[in-house]
Amino acid sequence: MKSGIKYVDGMDLHGVIKAGLEDFELDYTGCKSADMILENGGNIDGIAISLCDFTDKGFLKENASQIFRDAMSVADRYNAYIVIDTANVKKASVLEQIIDECVNEIVASDVNIFIENGYTNDNGRFYHNDYSEGSRLVELTDKLNMLAGCDKFGICINVGHANLLGINVRDMVRVCGKKTGIMHINDNDGKGDYHQMPYTFGTNESEGQVWDRIYKGLKDINFDGTLSFETFPTMNSFPKGMSASVLKTICSIGEYMAERIENEG
């Protein structure tokens, strides 16, 4: 098990790496930063792509397949995984069509692809989409693996996305089981996708996540994947002079989480 962090423009790479977070997940649209991350001593662990970038008013763009192939090429270059962000895309058929058109490249590649649980946001109200429930993600990844003829697809559980929909993450982890390869770690109060660091909103279910329950769920499946922190908005809540301390805190939370997951049961 390892901890990493989601890269955003303007991130103090030296400070992040010094704090102990060396593995980065970055958006496909920000891949120009990859070489800079490597030059600073970091690793490219994953490439994130948003399914919204492939669609226009619910339909696939003409160049959708090429965008996906380009993202695959980038992930291949850095020996990284791909995470597909499904927020605000209602129908699973959109993803299935892209995979069907790119299946030969997927099979020929060493890249693993993780589908993230999503939601639909309608004027600040959050609703389920085809990718919200663990059972649906299991069904979808089974279907895509069958299409590919090999186990290329897994699941990324975004803790914050689940919290917005009132989904019990421990139950979701158990449903997804060993297909769970990535955990996107962030916190919110159930009202907005704030991407704050864990424990920002306490440990009471009515306020934020019950993290102890999540650790037990991950222990139940012997999770040994990546804890990827999508928490950089946290930095905006503190003075710049505290950046090093905040980054170190995020790193320490990752170490604490890994220890709790390993020792729960």
Image (tube, helix red, strand yellow):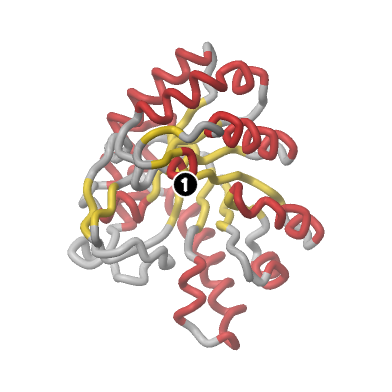
Residue that sits furthest to the left in the current view: 206
Secondary structure at badge 1 equals: helix
Q: Residues within 10 Å of mark 1 (few under 14, many from 20)?
A: some
Which residue bears the numbered disc 1? 262
Q: Is residue 120 left or right of residue 143?
A: left
- Give the residue drawn at x 28%, y 30%: 135
Above-or-below relation of 94 to 129: above
Quadrant location, the C terminus: top left
* Residue 4 spot, x, y in % from top left: 58, 54
Q: Say which quadrant the N terminus sits in.
A: top right
Res 59 → quadrant: top left
Q: Image height check: is 114 above or below 187? A: above
Q: How many marks?
A: 1
- Along the viewing direction, whichever of 41 and 53 lies nearer the viewer: 53
Mark 1: amino acid: Glu
| Residue toward you, 60 or 162 | 60
User: Looking at the image, which residue is at 29% across and 44% down?
Assistant: 170
Residue 129 image offset from top left, x and y in percent: 27, 40
